[in-house]
Image: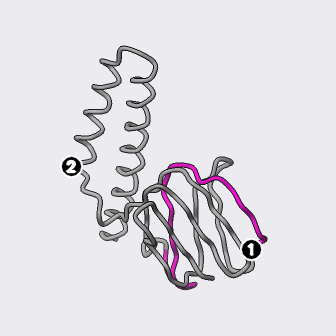
Amino acid sequence: MHLQLITLQGVSVDTDIYELMAPTAAGDIAVFPGHEPLVTLAAPGALAVRYEKGDKDDELEYFAVSGGVIEIAPTAVRVLVDEADRGDEITEAEVKAALDRAQKMKGEAKNQVEIEKATQLIDRAQVRLRVAELHHRRRHH
């Protein structure tokens, strides 16, 4: 099955894979070759890629993704998101600092727009932190 992960910066991943686990508005889904055609909304969360059938769970590659669209065909999957950060590209200390700033911003918000913006930043930081932790765990098993 072929995976294309496309962000606003361009094609991030364009390769053959065995399985994709993706966050959707209805919950996480797993996609294997031969999957029924489907178009669904991607939710912010961790995208996990299993490249080969025999790959163990600690060999999965993780990406932190923002919301977007997932297009599934029997032989291909295309994930279209604003951003996708590879687990090894995320620095936990930076993300924790960003999360602290966003939580402080939310605490000091003066209106609903500021609260919503801070909440989006908090959600993004939490997803990135989760993916960094998954990546870190993967590397140390």
Q: Which residue is mark 1?
A: 35
Image quadrant occupied by the C terminus? bottom left
Q: Residues within 10 Å of mark 2 (few under 14, many from 20)?
A: few
The boundaries of the magenta stretch are 36-56
| Horizontal side of residue 26 vs 105, given as left or right | right
Image quadrant occupied by the N terminus? bottom right
Q: Nearer the viewer, residue 79 or 129?
A: 79
Q: Is residue 55 magenta?
A: yes
Q: Amino acid at mark 2?
A: Ala
Q: Which residue is mark 2?
A: 93
- Disc 1 to disc 2, how far (Cα)? 38 Å
Residue at the spot 37% in from the left edge and 51% down from the top edge: 128
| Horizontal side of residue 111 vs 89, given as left or right | right
Quadrant in which residue 72 is drawn: bottom right
Residue at the spot 22% in from the left edge and 41% down from the top edge: 97
Question: Whole-percent x and y of residue 119?
Answer: 42, 31
The local secondary structure at tag 1 comes to loop
